[in-house]
Image (spheres, rainbow, N blue to C red):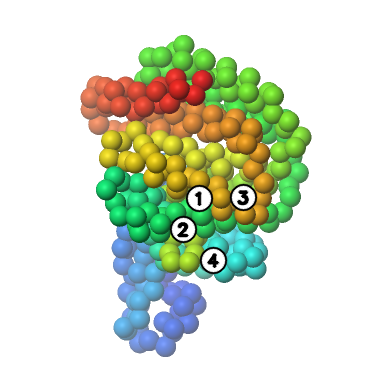
Amino acid sequence: MNGTRELLLPRLCSRADGYFPELATEPPPCRAEVVFSLDRVNSSVMKVSLAKGQTRRIVYVKTLADTPAARGVARARYEYDSLRGFAPKLAARSGRLLVPEPLDLFDDAATLVTRELEGRSLEHLIARAARRGIGIFSRRDAQTFCRLTGEWLAAFHSLEQLQADKPALLGRVVDDACRRLDSIRPHVGAAALLDRIAGRIRQESSRLPVGSLDVVPRHNDFAPRNVVAAPGRVGVLDFEDWGPGFAYEDLMRFGACLETMPRFPYVSKAAVAALHEQFLAGYRGTRTIDPEALRVFRLIGMAWQFGSEVSSLAGRPGAPARRAAWIRRFVVKSYIAWFDKEL
């Protein structure tokens, strides 16, 4: 990460005047400073301040790390070109629905540069609004943002109707959830329950009228942490993995993130349910939701979330014995309770 930072900051300064014409009128030199950075498994993100004179602007710098390196370059180009296409289409529908404005692409470094989406993480706003004892006005703000997020997703899904082999697509969604469940068997100690969950998912999904499910542009990581909210508008981040999929995949991803929150004692289950309903209401404003399909994908989404969260926690560095005990005692227990109730 440090090596990448040292290479990128001078390049950003050399192009700052092109990103922001107002910087061109200020006296040199340009000063680049990393305000925030986050390393993930296959990417890193930096929030960078570019300043000249008294003028300061913020950009986000995202580097995709893949093996081979050419794959990271291709994914960065894919996201950059996608953002250039999505931005005007969403703006034509509503000025309240945003994506980051792409400013630059460094092909040789698998890096794209975007203008800052001003606002706060919806994940943070939801977590605060869901806490017991929080005032009603904070919850109303969060409900408004959740409704706007539903409107954003409906607009994104309506950008175009895509073609795909629907039975094969559904099979991949189900197989992915079941693989994630299989991967956590060493950490869960409830093999019979995992088998029951996988069996129910396959049974329920086989009954869906798959031909009636729309194939749409699917974000593929539509979680509250990827939504930025500001008064009167929301924006969505991270498009490197978007592609054809079912609308219910994004709905289930967002819903699963919310449904896991009430396991914490300080979270109000009623508040979370109200936020989720506002999200769905915003989506229903322009698109239809089939209750049966939503129910089945909700089950798939929670299985996916179960496998993903336990795998992520188990794979973090630290004291393995203590971490394993914590996973079994708290995280696994909360999921088992959810599935015992739903199955």
Residue extending furthest toward the top? 192
Return the x and y of residue 145 as percentages of the image width and height.
46, 57
Badge 1 element: helix
Mark positioned earlier in the residue sequence (3 or 4): 4
Q: CA distance from mark 3 to mark 4?
A: 17 Å
Give residue 6's mark. Answer: none
Mark positioned earlier in the residue sequence (1 or 2): 2
Q: Which residue is mark 4?
A: 96
Give residue 144's mark. Answer: 2
Give, as a three-letter code, the residue at label 4: Arg
Q: Quadrant of residue 152?
A: bottom right
- Which residue: 49% across, 31% down? 302
Badge 4 element: loop
Give, as a three-letter code, the residue at label 2: Thr
Up-down: is 246 above or below 35?
A: above
Say few, some or many: other residues with alpha carbon within 10 Å of mark 1 (under 14 / 14 to 19 / 20 or more). Answer: many
- Disc nearest the viewer among 2 and 4: 2
Say few, some or many: other residues with alpha carbon within 10 Å of mark 2 (under 14 / 14 to 19 / 20 or more). Answer: some
Badge 2 element: helix
Up-down: is 270 above or below 168?
A: below
Give, as a three-letter code, the residue at label 1: Gln
Badge 3 element: helix
Q: CA distance from mark 1 to mark 2?
A: 7 Å
Q: Quadrant of residue 169?
A: top right
Q: Which residue is mark 3?
A: 284
Give, as a three-letter code, the residue at label 3: Arg
Say few, some or many: other residues with alpha carbon within 10 Å of mark 3 (under 14 / 14 to 19 / 20 or more). Answer: some
- Which residue: 72% across, 32% down? 210
- Which residue: 35% across, 76% down? 56
Q: Which residue is mark 1?
A: 278
